[in-house]
Image (cartoon, rainbow, N blue to C red):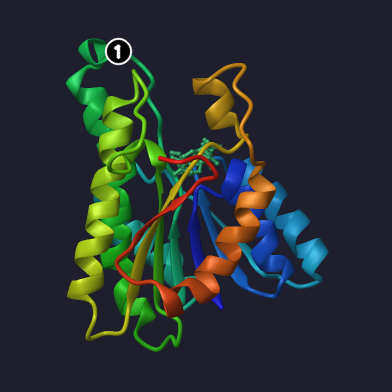
Amino acid sequence: MNILLTGASRGIGAELAQSLTGSGHRVLMVSRNKKALEQLAKTCNQQAGSELAHPIPFDLSDLTDLEDAFISRIRAHTGTIDALFNNAAQLIRKPFQQIALQDARRLFEVNFFVPAQLIRICLPFMADSELKHVVSVTSMAGFQGSGKYSGLSYYSASKAALGNLSECLAVEFAEEGVKVNALAIGSVQTEMLAESFPGFKAPLGPHQMAEFMHWFILHGGKFFNGKILPVSVSTP
Ligand SMILES: NC(=O)c1ccc[n+]([C@@H]2O[C@H](COP(=O)([O-])OP(=O)(O)OC[C@H]3O[C@@H](n4cnc5c(N)ncnc54)[C@H](OP(=O)(O)O)[C@@H]3O)[C@@H](O)[C@H]2O)c1
């Protein structure tokens, strides 16, 4: 399978890239950090014994660039995308009253508008695929009825919006056979978590979460469509 994975340079995304290439899938890996992506691709390709990891260093926050520059970067690697995995995100943990509009807009751009635009861009690449699965990583922080955290207002709202978009697009893309789901994950021990919740110990590591996501990308569309699934060992 050909999988477009955003946020591959570290954390859950880096583990997922290794897991997928380790099983023979081609992964187009996107993040801003060229060096980290190239290093990861080297590791993945050595482990796989084949050129399966393809780094695409790209700043996804510029929506205007997505249209031409990003599409041509995808075309340079493949004509078909079987699955899109929207994993890249930005987190702001700050009191609501102190978050400037431009910072809130930037966060919504990376966490909501970019995944939305990537879905639009990837749809034509999925036409010949048998899988056709769009999976977006949201958060328990943006899951209806879950416990909320002070300081995560815009982050949580952006994740809730992305989950809702997944529900809507599953209906809209039903005729094309494209499955669209969101995984509202609980805490995972990554740099993002350590930076925003210093000292907190998550019940899962990125490797464990990546193993579940690997399975879900390939098989989740047979069981779920238009769903926001809480992936958490604690009760929301
Ligand atoms: N860890 C948790 O406890 C937790 C809980 C709930 C939900 N989540 C969600 O799970 C996903 C992965 O989280 P994580 O903890 O692995 O986060 P992370 O370690 O901070 O990784 C985030 C990734 O997103 C990329 N990224 C951010 N802005 C980008 C941009 N403008 N353009 C391209 N790439 C960009 C980063 O790469 P560069 O810096 O190289 O660009 C990085 O690879 C996120 O969607 C997060 O919101 C995580």
Q: Look at 61% across and 32% down and name the residue there.
A: 202
Tell me the kind of residue under disc 1: Pro
**In this view of the protein, can residue 87 be seen by the observer?**
yes
Q: Position of residue 140 (x, y in %)?
A: 40, 41
Task: Name the residue carrying label 1.
Answer: 95
Would you place residue 1 above or below residue 85 in this image?
A: below
Assess disc 1: are there few (<14), some (14-19) or many (≥20) residues with their C-alpha within 10 Å of its C-alpha: few
Q: Position of residue 170 (x, y in %)?
A: 26, 71
| Element type where label 1 sits in the image | loop
**Split into 4 quadrants, where in the image is the C terminus?**
top left
Q: Look at 63% across and 37% down and name the residue there.
A: 203
In the rendered structure, the answer to whether residue 119 lies left or right of residue 37 reads left
In the rendered structure, the answer to whether residue 106 lies left or right of residue 83 reads left
Q: Position of residue 172 (x, y in %)?
A: 18, 73
State which quadrant residue 51 falls in.
Answer: bottom right
**Split into 4 quadrants, where in the image is the N terminus?**
bottom right
Q: Look at 76% across and 73% down and name the residue there.
A: 50
